[in-house]
Amino acid sequence: MSLSLLDLILGRPLASSEDRKEKIGALQGVPIFGLDALGSAAYGPEAALTVLLALGGLGLNYILPITLAIIALLGVVYFSYRQTIPAYPHGGGSYTVASENLGTFPGLLAASALMIDYILVVAVGISAGVGALVSGVPSLQPHTLGLCLAILLVIALVNLRGLRDTGLAFLVPTYAFIGTMLAVLAWGLFKAVAGSGHPIPVVAPPHFGPVHEAVAAWLLLKAFSSGCTAMTGVEAVSNGVAIFRAPADKNAQGTLTIIIGLLMVMLAGIAYLCHAYQIGATPPGQPGYESVLSQLTAAIAGRGIFYYVTMASILLVLSFQANTAFSGFPRLCHSIARNSYLPHSFARRGRRLVFSQGIALLTLLAAGLLVLFGGVTDRLIPLFAIGAFLAFTLSQAGMVAHWKRKSGRHARYSMIVNGLGAIATAITTLVVVVSKFAEGAWITLLVIPALIATMYKVKQHYDELEAETTKRTPLSTQKLAPPLVVVPVGGWSQIAHRNLRFAMMMSTDIIAVHVDNGEGRENLSALWKEFVEEPARRAGLPVPQLTILKSPYRFIIAPILRFVLELERTHPDRFIAVVVPELVEKHWYQYFLHEQRGKILSLLLIFRGNQRISIINVPWHLDATPTSEKISRELKAVTEEKQNAA
């Protein structure tokens, strides 16, 4: 039942040979890799307009030049990544490019920046979508966090089902958003041209507040850096080239072109129409707040059915834009893990041929952020661009080094393009860090070194493990003696009977250990003579030794642990095997009815012992077979064994 339920939720397991069926085309790549970039059109221009609120209505005179500067930078990044894709057909994310061309530290720096960016994309994207929903339906306000976590769970489960299912699940909301946004922009542009650049809004936007600041270069730089949040998510396509159908590089370039082209059109259209319709940002978090896209759609089309369809598509994309991070983050972890800077398990694909552990980690980290901020993470939006642009810069600088090693006219042209990209994104990174430092950028600058240090520690562990375990030597045939076997015995029972028989098959040196905590109801020493010593002597076998440990404070596990460790110390030339009984219940809830001392003892021996102490878990399966029948089977087996020996 549990297996069928798992298949229903996540889909049936996919064989490695089915990998080709999971490949995607250029159009399918848009909902998988483009939701973040396209969704940022909903808040990138608004973030810039929010900074320009201090200029009142004059701020609209600068939104178009600022947006054009962002579009120009986006174009440079596009051409740079378009060249990265064929150069790294198995995935050319910032980490891979920087590591191979600039060295380990720049690669880990890019990786850390991207990891932070992906986590923020998930938490902030979902909270922004829910925030917009709550602003439209105020009765949902008390359920903000619950809605955020529910959406996060849905996105995680969809991604765990595999690439094709993910693309299909987000296909409708993605293209609904694209269709409605392009319709709004085309309709608004037509009315603006018909009105000689001064269209009459159907629903008048709110009036601008008073001017609080004079126009200054610093204010415009802050608006530019806020608007650059519209460029997050561009990295994801180059990181996932391997999942596209052949020719993978052409399909990946096609997806990147569609995403960037649509984003450029949306940014330019929103900026122009905001100026034409005199639409600015409203103070976020205050009464009367209304998003820029809501004002723009209402001004162009009124508040009819089309308005609500458009706003619904925007809400869906804002909520689901986290899907881009769920595509990029696990692949980034996979690349890092292959170089041993993250646990190797992140490099393995799960039941649906996706990197399940990366998806799970991203879900947990994003859920932690949402819980920490109560589902309201809008204050983290300005931090988006830091990780993204730092990764852009390192990637483009790495590509410059890549082309420098090549020769020919194409390599020189490509090096110039990537060089311009590196310079432009480096300057933007500096502007974003300085302008957003007081708003929380300092947090990112602290977290990145901590992540890098952690990854170095992981690598150090794997290097030490390899140095200790991978040395190849001929098989040693010296001192091949049976181990000294320790069998913990709680009392004489069928479990003790079975474990002792198992131990006698391994060695002639057996020590049964019983802990007397003063609460025993039977004389084990007497039972031992009758049920163990006498049968062993009659069979001519070595007699297992019984050792009784006193425990005045009623401890059970600690005395056995001390006994085994002391035995290991006093027998430096012997291997020691500890036979630990394990109860295997029929139902999961029955495990809570037992103290699980065997599991605890095994764990303690693992962490306190060494290479000469081995642990052998012997399961005892609890089933409906009566104990008398089990005893009869055991006696019959013993009788047949004696007859065969005779």
Image (cartoon, rainbow, N blue to C red):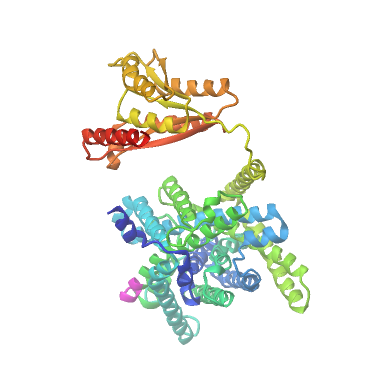
The residue lying furthest to the front in this view is 646
For the question of whether residue 481 can be seen, the reply is: yes
Q: Is residue 107 above or below residue 182?
A: above
Left or right relative to 156: residue 259: right
Q: Is residue 590 above or below residue 240?
A: above
The residue lying furthest to the bottom in this view is 194
Q: Give the mark count.
A: 0
Residue 526: x percent and y percent? 32, 14
Q: Is residue 77 above or below residue 326?
A: below
For the question of whether residue 35 can be seen, the reply is: no
Image quadrant holding the C terminus, namely top left
Foreground residue among 526 and 487: 526
Q: Identify the magenta region.
A: 303-309
Residue 201: x percent and y percent? 40, 76
Asked whether residue 305 is drawn in magenta, I would say yes
Majority secondary structure in the magenta region: helix
Foreground residue among 401 and 208: 401
Q: Kindly indicate the quadrant of the structure image that contains residue 125.
A: bottom left
Residue 394: x percent and y percent? 67, 60
Q: Is residue 116 above or below residue 603?
A: below
Asked whether residue 579 is drawn in magenta, I would say no
Left or right relative to 362: residue 302: left
